[in-house]
Amino acid sequence: LSLFEGGLGQLGVGLAQMLREQYGKENVILSDIKRPPADVFNMGPFVYADVLDYKNLRELVVNNRITWLVHYSALLSAVGEANVTLARTINITGLHNVLDLALENCLRLFVPSTIGAFGPSSPRDPAPDLCIQRPRTIYGVSKVHGELMGEYLHHKYGLDFRCLRYPGVISATTKPGGGTTDYAVQIFHDALGSGHHECYLRPQTRLPMMHISDCHRATIEFMQADECQLSLRTYNIAAISFTPEEVAAEIRKHVPQLTVTYKPDPVRQNIADSWPMRFDDSNARRDWGWKPAYGLPELVTDMLDRVQNKRTNAGLPVS
Ligand code: VAH
């Protein structure tokens, strides 16, 4: 039985849906501190859970005989830089609550990390699993701390801690959470809406990215891997790596009228310039068979279809 907290962010609902298809609706509990939309509420069990309220989390784990915890609560890169104290509290104190809970109840724990766990002194093209990590955001610092704490508790107490460093995740029906890669979602909505995208990164800013379906499948395959397969507890996973001008050019093959202007936002440009341009995920491919399905053409085709469907269902004009 798994409990997701931070379940109403960009990733929680879709992953819960996939796990429910495999393990049954009642065996996956989604939680967050916000009221869920009706369709999410009707999808399966949803409860209130605040990652800062240890007693609330412990009651949920005990009363529902939870065995897996998926920890999706975090403030992402850009929003964290605007709320450093809150980001430190949620991303570090919240993480420690989840780690203590996992130890106390012998839970298996999945915690995502990110390309943001690397910094300007890390190898950038590609960044391997094991290298210098001196990130320059509170988000990145908190995620490196999460990796180190999880691995320490695994080696000292045998905690089944599992962590994947996600690239920027591209989704059609859920909003990204205020990060630096969010432009790569917005550009699809703009292409089919106004036809114009104002990009807050420079045209040649290369970042690792991944279709949300690949992200969910990687997470499930990793959670299902036998422990004896894992030579690491934290893995990079990669799929594609593109720049704003490359994704715009690919979209224009379907939406020729798309125009893009570039107005770099210093905060997010500096963050992006400190992150890897590509990931080396050879350990994930070798240890537990990771293999992405969506390249850039497939991602663009799928995203345009899904965003167009979403616009049609919302009664918006076809561009
Ligand atoms: C961010 N989308 O931009 C998140 C993610 C890899 C990027 O961590 O902060």
Image (cartoon, rainbow, N blue to C red):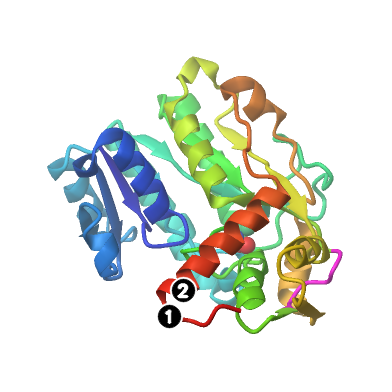
The answer to whether 164 is drawn above or below residue 135 in the figure is: above
- The image shows residue 297, relative to residue 69, as above or below, that is below
Q: Residues within 10 Å of mark 1 (few under 14, many from 20)?
A: few
Query: In the image, residue 173 lies at what x, y percent?
Result: 47, 64
Give the farthest residue toward the left: 63
**Do the residues bearing badges 1 and 2 touch, measured as CB atoms within 8 Å?**
yes
Image side of residue 97 versus residue 215, left or right: left
Q: Seen from this angle, which residue lies furthest top?
A: 228
Say which amino acid is labelled 1. Answer: Gly
Looking at the rendering, the stretch of residues picked out in magenta corresponds to 199-204
Please state the quadrant of the image where ligand 1 appears.
Answer: bottom right
Image quarter for residue 204?
bottom right
Seen from the viewer's position, the closer of residues 69 and 142 is 69
Q: Which residue is mark 1?
A: 315
Instruction: List x then y, in percent, for residue 280.
Output: 75, 36
Residue located at (68% from left, 41% from top) = 238
Q: Tag 2, which secondary structure?
A: helix
Compared to residue 154, the image places residue 239 above or below, namely below
